[in-house]
Amino acid sequence: MLYLFLDIDGVLRPDSKPNNYVLSNHLLGSLYQVVALTDGNLKIVVTSSWRLVMDRASIAKKLKLPANMVEVMPVLDDENARGGGVIAYMAKVYAEKGETPFMALDDQPDLYEGFWDGVLFPCEPDSGFDDGVLALLKSRLSQKTALFKACASLML
């Protein structure tokens, strides 16, 4: 199982578009390619502020994905420390399931403190999860050993 921490605004909805909770079909297509590459063995954990105004089922419906594939990260004491939230979330997963790979897609890499190379895939806010970011993520997925090492180094 791969855990994908997903911001939405600036990733699946370009910041240049009005904030009307309408996602880009093209950018959703990039997400669906990741679902296909993992044979659906994927858990999407929403880190976006959308989780503050919508429940998990509503977000899954917007993503056009099965509700059991989508989770929401708990609300953080400091919403500007998203990386810390990911680490705390994955600590629970590691305790239950052992080492488990994870990645993050976000247009605000400054919310991730520390060395996230090979785990965090930053998106440009106006272009989102475009073909270039998708190519980088696909490349990393093909290097499973390197991905596990990068994840493990963050969990130390």
Image (cartoon, rainbow, N blue to C red):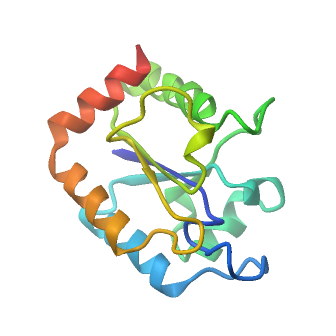
Residue found 18% across the figure and 41% down from its top: 144
Residue found 62% across the figure and 63% down from its top: 8
Drawn side of residue 10 relative to residue 150, left or right: right
Between 121 and 23, the residue placed more toward the observer is: 121
Q: How many marks?
A: 0
x, y percent for residue 52: 81, 53
- Which residue sits furthest bottom? 25
* Quadrant of the frame with the C terminus: top left
Between 125 and 41, the residue placed more toward the observer is: 125
- Which residue sits furthest top? 156
Residue found 61% across the figure and 28% down from its top: 84
Drawn side of residue 52 relative to residue 134, left or right: right
x, y percent for residue 35: 35, 65
Any part of residue 64 in sight: yes
x, y percent for residue 32: 39, 73
Residue found 56% across the figure and 29% down from its top: 113
